Image (tube, grey):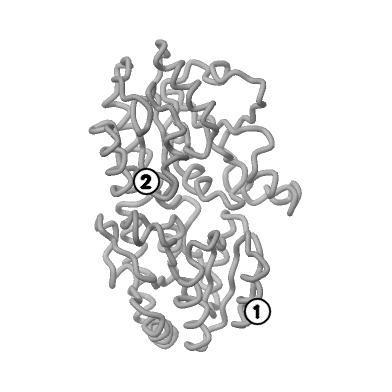
Amino acid sequence: MKIRYFTHSLLSCWNHGNAHFLRGVLRELAMLGHDVLALEPEGNWSLSNLLADHGEAGLTAFRIAYPELRTRSYGDDEQPENLLDDADVVIVHEWNEPSLVARLGDIRAGGGGFTLLFHDTHHRAVSDPGAIRAFDLSGFDGVLAFGETLADVYRRWGWGNRVWTWHEAADIRHFQPPEEEGERSGLVWIGNWGDGERTAELEEYLFRPAPAAGLPLDVYGVRYPDAALRTLERYGVRYHGWAPNAAAPEIFARHLATVHVPRRFYTKRLPGIPTIRMFEALACGIPLISAPWSDSESLFSPGDDYLVARTGAEMARHLKSLASDPDLRASLVSKGIETVRARHSCAHRARELLDIAATLRPVHQPESMGTVA
């Protein structure tokens, strides 16, 4: 099949978490023999910031890790219909312009011979529903939601059995334990500041517990305002700025443990949706401790795949235990890797997508669903 994915960016993961999953799942689809191409707007925000900060060198890690992937940039003056190239399946990520989404829907509703899916990997459906309502999805065949609670939102909006839960996952071709174990020390956290969505949580479950447990803390990420940098300095955190996602396995391999700190919307309004870093960390074989988070879909086995800290004090106790107990670390690593490889790889998600597409073949006119409401 010809599969075309309209993304914000495939090339850049600068504050663009969807690129992590997209790279892995598109590679899996290509390796299954499908004709796969990512389409991204010229001058997109993520790539522009990456190039401004790091130049072309910022793309090196991606190009080395994913030589198989194909991407095409398009300008504002290019018509979407000229980008489709007789595609069989077209997927449009929610971080695209409403005008593009509407035009693709019009083409599909007008007899376009492809299956058209909307891919939502954000909390805006509950945090800023007006932004999602701006999308005219009336011509779309269905919605891919990255968690069951988000899928339920679309069902309430009238999508019924035309919405599928399609979780993110780890690209286990790249995210693996090191071939040879070296020295590990300290705690690491890879993540962006989050626009104030988890500021208090980061302080309670990361910045305070690390020194309390006697562990130096390394932090990687972008969009840390001056106030955040002052907070890191106050706690003695070593801040390294942006790291390409392709470099994450090397970073994890140097550290004793990492922490999962979900954004507030994924603990309060859309529970059950982990960050993709959780999948990636477990795949890399680094012990993980999570701040409070409800695994409502039983994706993992809390307590076996990772530890759960209900308070900052409990986080510090867990960190001390990990630092002093190699058997505990080994058990968590073994169970975490096993779970990801059994259920949460990009290969699993590629097969799920093909199964979804198969239920929508042969190509048919989509049912009238109207705009998102």
Q: Residue at x 35, y 57 (%)?
A: 340
**Where does residue 35 sit, x and y in percent of width and height?**
48, 26
Element type at mark 1: helix
* Viewer-nearest of discs 1 and 2: 1
Up-down relation of residue 363 to residue 255 (above or below): above
Report the quarter where the C terminus lies: top left
User: Pointer 2: what residue?
Assistant: 146
User: Pointer 1: what residue?
Assistant: 233
Q: Residue at x 56, y 38 (%)?
A: 8
Instruction: Give left or right: position of 274 versus 30.
Output: left
Q: Nearer the viewer, residue 186 or 97?
A: 97
> Which of the labelled discs sits on residue 247, or is there none?
none
User: Which residue lies most toward the top here?
Assistant: 111
**Where does residue 361 sit, x and y in percent of width and height?**
30, 20
Instruction: Give left or right: position of 70 versus 164.
Output: right
Q: Is residue 122 visible from the viewing direction of this image?
A: no
Instruction: Give left or right: position of 237 versus 284.
Output: right
Q: Is residue 264 visible from the viewing direction of this image?
A: yes
Dot 1 crowding, Cα within 10 Å, few <14, some 14–19, many 20+: few
